[in-house]
Image (tube, rainbow, N blue to C red):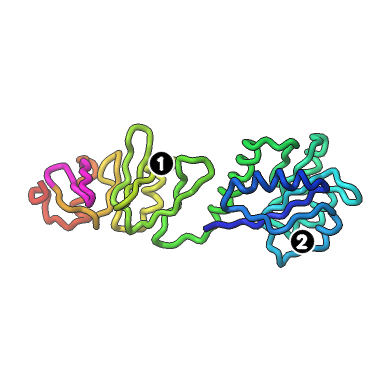
Amino acid sequence: MLTLKCAIVDDENFAIELLSDHIKLFQELNVVKSFTDPAEALVKITPEDRIDILFLDIDMPGLSGLELGMRLKSRVKYIIFTTAFSKYALEAFGVRAQDYLLKPIEKIKFIESIQEILELEKRRLPVSKDLLFVKSNLKGKFVGIKISQVILIYIEGHRLFIVEKNQKYETTESLKNIEQRLSDNLNFLRIHNSNIVNLEKIIKIEGNTIELEGKYKVPISEKYKPKLINAIGVESRNNFQ
């Protein structure tokens, strides 16, 4: 499971507590360090900590969040500034901040900001040859599906579904995109404008209908029939019908 380490720097304890509550909304996030003294944070946040997200207040005594961010940006992956003052926004992005959240931080704004980071991180995950990562119907969420377990991929209305033996996933991906991503896998073949099948999951073929494991039945279109004939090794079209 993807886990991102977080650190919080804010000179007010209650602000750290409120931000920590927001962070708990995401099981992928884990707060490993927090500081009310920016100078202490400068010393104690090290490259070895491998901090993924640094939540950083801007208006702090002694050392501003902007100054601290400039010094720490090489030690952390993402910086999200949190402040009650919108006037610092331009300078914040000069530090290459991922986001800038105004206090009091709205829960929805916080969720959207974190979801963007999670989406970026999940795209960087090493991909197994037997794992297909697809966007789910929930914003910012990706699902890893075992390719060898996939029976059928089909369109219903304006929605796309990927069917495994024990589960069905809805995704915002297009059928064309999935077809391209599976193009190197000879087990998958598009047999209709609305579906792709796993040839290894075929139980029988009757006329222009394929029955798959799980009692799924899907149509074969004339357009794709020649490819299916070649793929399953039927000697002639007459034998196929």
Coordinates of residue 210 in the picture (x, y in percent): 18, 46
Tag 2: amino acid: Ile
Tag 1: amino acid: Ser
Please, which residue is most extreme toward the top here?
157
Answer left or right for 233 relative to 132: left
**Residue, x 61% and y 41% (percent of image)?**
111
Q: Earlier in the sequence, mark 2 or mark 1?
A: 2
User: In the image, which disc is placed on residue 45?
Assistant: 2
**Residue, x 16% and y 42% (percent of image)?**
208
Please, which residue is most extreme toward the right here?
62
Q: Which residue occupies the foreground of this view, 205 or 240?
A: 205
**Residue, x 14% and y 48% (percent of image)?**
205
Q: Which residue occupies the foreground of this view, 94 or 23?
A: 23
Per the image, label 2 sits on a secondary structure element best described as loop
Q: In the rendered view, tell whether residue 182 sits above or below residue 50.
A: above
Q: Quadrant of residue 110?
A: top right
User: In the image, which disc is placed on residue 174?
Assistant: 1
Q: In the rendered view, tell whether residue 91 sits above or below residue 72.
A: above
Q: Is residue 223 magenta?
A: no
Residue stretch in magenta: 206-219
User: In the image, which disc is placed on residue 219?
Assistant: none
Q: Quadrant of residue 177?
A: top left
Q: Residues within 10 Å of mark 1 (few under 14, many from 20)?
A: some
Whether residue 223 is visible, yes or no, is yes
Determine whether label 2 and label 1 are within 8 Å by CB.
no
Distance from the alpha carbon under mark 2 to that under mark 1: 43 Å
Per the image, label 1 sits on a secondary structure element best described as loop
Please, which residue is most extreme toward the left here?
238
Please, which residue is most extreme toward the bottom here?
48
Please identify, in this view, whether the residue under mark 2 or under mark 1 is nearer the observer.
2
